Amino acid sequence: MAISVRAVGPADLPLVTRALAGGWGATLVAFGRGELVDAAALPGFLAFDGDEPAGLVTYVERDGGREVEVVTLDAWLPGRGVGRALLDAVRGEAVRRGADRLTLITTNDNTHALRFYQRYGFDLVALHRHGVDAARRLKPGIPAEADGIPIRHELELELPLSAG
Ligand SMILES: CC(C)(COP(=O)(O)OP(=O)(O)OC[C@H]1O[C@@H](n2cnc3c(N)ncnc32)[C@H](O)[C@@H]1OP(=O)(O)O)[C@@H](O)C(=O)NCCC(=O)NCCS
């Protein structure tokens, strides 16, 4: 079945809360540099495979609307185009708002996401050494390692938006 995407609405709060708590340990997530945000309160898009929830992206507007930052992105049905469809939705929304760039931060362990984002068109613009160590002081539940790789650093990626 084709993947469909729609904006998160107030009635989705239980699903969004459950999903964020499952994926990230809590709806409070570390993002940007040294910030914590309740991602369940952010705007976002949900993906569905038929009636089955398939993924979630949340985002914030920054820099007076010139930047849209992806805060969380999760595909619950991997390798089916869910991640791409959700990024397409945020990118469309960012262009509609007049933003000139879409940004996000991932972590040094997340080689799969780094591959996925670069294949999508994002470019690496900064390495924040020990950015995750700093975030962990705000949110001690951030795991120490993933797949045997210590989670320490933040990688900042950017996708220029031509219509901005
Ligand atoms: C990173 C993540 C969001 C990618 O989402 P995804 O839905 O698996 O990504 P897509 O399906 O859009 O793309 C992945 C691959 O599937 C392929 N694909 C897309 N649609 C497809 C389809 N209908 N059938 C088969 N393959 C398909 C894509 O071409 C891509 O292939 P490639 O790896 O050879 O480039 C997902 O792995 C995830 O949720 N990871 C855990 C959370 C996370 O790390 N989030 C990012 C934090 S910064």
Image (cartoon, rainbow, N blue to C red):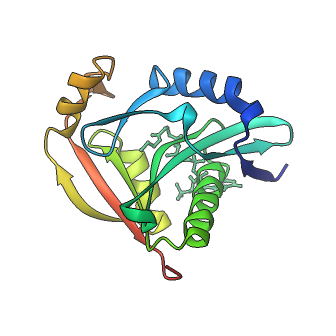
**Most extreme residue toward the bottom, as rendered?**
162
Foreground residue among 147 and 138: 138
Foreground residue among 145 and 129: 129
Residue 55: x percent and y percent?
A: 65, 40
Residue at 26%, 43% (x, y): give it: 108
**Most extreme residue toward the front, as rendered?**
64
Q: Number of labelled discs?
A: 0
Quadrant housing residue 154: top left
Q: Give the left or right position of residue 7, taking residue 21 as reference.
A: right
Residue 99 lies, with reference to residue 137, above or below; the image says below
**Most extreme residue toward the left, as rendered?**
129
Q: Is residue 151 visible?
A: no
Residue 106: x percent and y percent?
A: 34, 46
Residue at 55%, 44% (x, y): give it: 58
Residue 44: x percent and y percent?
A: 61, 46
Residue 115: x percent and y percent?
A: 41, 55
Residue 119 lies, with reference to residue 140, above or below; the image says below
Residue at 63%, 35% (x, y): give it: 76
Q: Can residue 39 be seen in this view?
A: yes
Residue at 65%, 57% (x, y): give it: 85
